Image (spheres, helix red, strand yellow):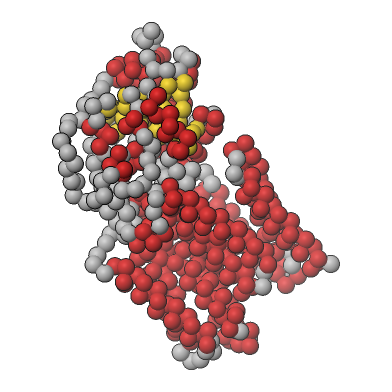
Amino acid sequence: MTRAVAQFAAILATALFIFSLHWMNDPKTARHGVVAGVSGMLVAVLATWFQPEIVHHGWIVLAIVAGFIVGVPLSRVPLTAVPQRTALSHAFGGLAAGLVGTAEYYLWVGKGPELLTPFRMSAIVAEVILGFLTFTGSLMAAGKLQEVRWIPQRPVTYPGQNFVNIGILGVAVVLGVLVVLQPTAVWSGRAFSGIVGLAVLFGVLLIIPIGGADMPTVISILNSYAGLSAVAMGFVLDNKLLVTAGALDGSSGLILSIIMCRAMNRSFMNVLFGAFGQVQAATAVGEQKEWKQETIEGAAQLLEQASLVVIIPGYGMAVAQAQHKVRELYDQLTKRGIAVKFAIHPVAGRMPGHMNVLLAEANIPYTALVEMDEINPEMPQCDVALVIGANDVVNPAARYAKHTPIYGMPIIDADKAKTVLAIKRSKNPGFAGIDNELYVQDNTWMLFGDAKAVLGDLVKQFGSGGLH
């Protein structure tokens, strides 16, 4: 009876996970997707916990309580910190898989060596490698996103780096093959420890050469790795629910990674080994022009005289936490009959959908959010393109400057608007390390300062009654 209930619970949880992913495809049903995902996980945990061979282990209650103690505070981070919060989730998932695989190996070596079949041992090795590299890789990604002082956001590269990384992974795989063939040999324990150490090291070395511009894709790839480690753990524990849940997680992360790479017109290999975002010496292209600065009053007048305003948000908006001021400006413009649209680049921000989440927090209608491919044909008719903290995703150099790391990356055609207003904290380049040619165009005017403060001043101009 208990086994039948557990199997039914596994089917129910799997169905809820599938519906969760499906409903996440549309903002209108996204909340249903969240509820379905949480419900599915609750069913899965309870069904596993109440199995006869597990429920008598009272110490599991302590683990569940510890999970709540850690998880509740993490759920209350500001939306600007969601990318690093997501990376931490991947880290915890990878660590759990790696620890379970390690524990199972040493347990079975001592008490049930006959259980270490080649298939199960292969699954353990895959689980440990994927789990621990996901753990340290995700911690490094979270550190870069959080701008931790001792973890540089810029790529850290050195000669022969890719050969070193591939060599470390290759040694770990070779040791894994040897352990699979001789899991109970005297030297196997040390070899297994070596696999763990190499996987931990590889996770660090995999992420340090990747710049901040690639973080959205890196996070989705790490999500895929975490899912694959869960699949391997499911095979080790003979848990079908873990296999299906991990497969859903891994495949969705892989699909998202493919979408993100296509958005940047790049491959997985280029993301993982290309050190995109590496600082390069700026190369002059054509005549060097000066940046032109506009006043708040002049910018407000340009916006009020427009018929169509396209707002292009970027990471600068997230850092300044300016999304609510963006909403106030949106309200002021639409109240005057001005059409306002938001152009969303797939890799704007630090994680997939980062801009969408921030704008949703400010209750900006999803109908006003337009994807890059749909907004670009409208840009020549745009009266004012308001760029808020976006950089590489609006840089015209991506179309033709082959010497730059963003060459070939699709961009939002902000430069084709009649007038461009760009809010930027300083003249520093973006994560790709190159100057943005958009900012020196004849039709571009700069508004220097913190995005939240600049937008607040613009809103005051509209609210003061000084504009007619």
- Total marks shown come to 0
- Front residue of 202/341: it is 341
| Whether residue 105 is situated above or below residue 392 in the rendered picture | below
> Which residue is rendered at x = 44% and y = 82% of the image?
175
> Which residue is rendered at x = 18% and y = 46% of the image?
283
Q: Is residue 456 visible?
A: no
Q: Position of residue 128 (x, y in %)?
A: 50, 72
Would residue 43 be found to the left or right of residue 385 on screen? right
Residue 156, image quadrant: bottom left
For the C terminus, the quadrant is top left
> Which residue is rendered at x = 69% and y = 57% of the image?
14
| Whether residue 208 is situated above or below residue 439 in the rendered picture | below
Q: Position of residue 273 (x, y in %)?
A: 34, 62
> Which residue is rendered at x = 39% and y = 62% of the image?
269
Q: Residue furthest right?
A: 1
Would residue 196 be found to the left or right of residue 232 on screen? left
For the N terminus, the quadrant is bottom right
Would residue 59 be found to the left or right of residue 451 on screen? right
- Front residue of 393/14: it is 393
